[in-house]
Amino acid sequence: MSKIRLIELCEKFYENSLSEHEKQELEQLLNLSDENKKFFDEHVNFFKELNDFGEFYKFKTTLNKVSERYSGKVVSSRLGVIHKIVQYSSVAAVSIIAVLFTLYVTGWFSFKHQIQNYKQLSNTITTISKNQKSLWNILFSSNEVTYLRGTAFAISSEGFLATSYHLVRDYDSVLVINASDSTIKMHAKLLAYDQKLDVAILKISDSIFSSIKNIPYNLNFHYPIELGNYVYTLGFSKNSIVFGEGSISSFTGFNEDTNSIQISIPTNPGNSGSPVFNKYGEVIGIICGKNEGKEGSSYALHSKVLKNIIDSLSGNKATSIHFKNTIRYLPKNQQISKIIPYIFKIEIYK
Amino acid sequence: MDNRLPFSEEELLEGLKSNNAMVIAYLYKKNYPSVANFVRLNGGSDDEAKDIFQETLVTLFHKVRQENFILTAKLNTYIYSVARNLWLTELKRKKQKSEDVFELEEFIPNDELLLEDVEMTKLKYNRLNWSLEQLGEPCKSILSYYYFYKWSMQEIADKMGYTNADNAKTQKYKCLLRLKKIFQKM
């Protein structure tokens, strides 16, 4: 214990923040034994080294960022194409090898198993490509950078966000922008996903991010679906946040899918990943798509499917998923203004 | 193109010392092409050129932080010379002959660059970095947050789940004592 006090005094000495009283205490400790004196000299020096190392560490971080940004520009255009071909073909080669390897390792027995799964998979594919239009936006900004826009919402203080998987599939980089302050763009990475259910968990990975405090809503994993119940959603079908409301109109989603429900809220591209709230301000679903043929009906994934993926994260420090609802009895407009800061616009660059 | 310098040489050195991203980006833009040309013409790849340039700026960073550092040539020349030195050393390490060096620009000879002390610093930081890795969690995070990211003890306590800042502080000092021991042993 005395060692800890001594090292604290050493640090304060190094920072030049000793009080008069502490100065006396340090002097006494140093007079006590030569060992303490040696300890003092070594550790004050060590603080300097540690501090220098900290400066170097910051420099190295900046340097890496700058060089990353810069290295993209130095390749001349022709070289760039060759570079890309090489890059892509190596990626393709790796993928092919990976597929072959998997087939080889899993053997014939599981191969048959895969054929069975494949039916389900193809079902999902037709679901998305033929009838159900994925709610994403392909935008071309002036400098011809293509990105998708969607919505995500906070589910834990560590910066975990829930959204639709189809948005972030094949992503190159994901930026999240807070609904209440559009000037701050932060990088996020894909932490977990379930392709079949079309749900993904992102984590804000930007160095400027610290934490998300006081999430006002909770996730209701066991919400009993009743037709006609009031629901509303907040999402980015345009550049600023848009509110939409309606009712639960069917127990099941597209093609009688029991993992999702149908709601009578008109949704638009960009709404993918938007949370669906009930009148208590509880998240009961995530907008995942709509039926192109039928106007005004959208599909939302039931929040129960979020539970599995969140549970799978529990080994991943997602321990503080927030469950306390502080807006339950507020009128709708106040609920909404409390919720907005926790909704994020996401931009996905490919 | 505007040919005026947006930074004076003193500003560049000061910016490098204080970790100014604009200055670092500027140094990249101005100096990377000639360094890359030198490396490529002398048997290096694009990636190697990038590595050498990063290493050059790291060397320069350590050098300008030394109290007795005086820039004796133009900064461009100095950067080019350091990069040249590093690449020739790398070639020697790879046992490729470097007798016929293809020279592009004026440079300061290697023995006048005095980079030995920088090598010492680099080794020391590698050791410190390695010691931190050895330390494991939660110590590595606590110390990094405090000494590198400059978080307050309260923020660290919140992030790491300590009941209060004092507990986190005690833990920090315990970690520090262990780090010092590991670092010393090496």
Image: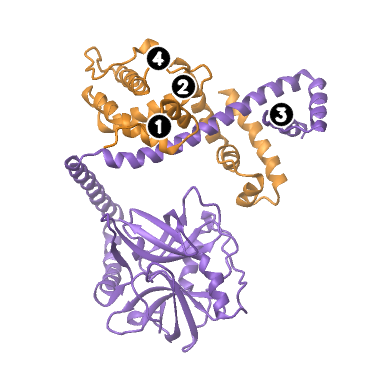
Chain colours: A purple, B orange
Q: Chain of mark 2?
A: B
Residue A23 visible in the displayed image: yes
Instruction: Report which quarter residue B136 is drawn in.
Output: top right
Q: Amino acid at mark 2?
A: Lys
Q: Secondary structure at mark 3?
A: helix
Viewer-nearest residue: B62 or A37: B62
| C-alpha separation, residue under disc 1 versus residue under disc 3 | 37 Å
Between tags 2 and 1, which lies in front?
Answer: 1
Identity of the residue furthest to the bottom in this view: A228
Q: Secondary structure at mark 1?
A: loop
Q: Chain of mark 3?
A: A
Res B113 label: 4
| C-alpha separation, residue under disc 4 versus residue under disc 2 | 10 Å
Tell me, yes or no, whether dots 3 and 4 are on the same chain: no
Of the image marks 1 and 4, the number of the one nearer the N terminus: 1
Q: Amino acid at mark 1?
A: Phe
Of the image marks 2 and 1, the number of the one nearer the N terminus: 1
Q: Secondary structure at mark 2?
A: helix
Viewer-nearest residue: A197 or A348: A348
Of the image marks 4 and 2, the number of the one nearer the N terminus: 2
Q: Amino acid at mark 4?
A: Leu
Vertical position of residue A83 compared to residue A115: above or below: above
- Residue ID for mark 1: B7
Instruction: Report x, y in % for residue A103.
Output: 26, 55
Q: Chain of mark 1?
A: B
Between tags 1 and 4, which lies in front?
Answer: 1
Residue A218 visible in the displayed image: no
- Residue ID for mark 3: A13
Horizontal arrangement in the rendering, residue B116 relative to residue B146 (left or right) = left
Identity of the residue furthest to the top in this view: B111
- Residue ID for mark 2: B63
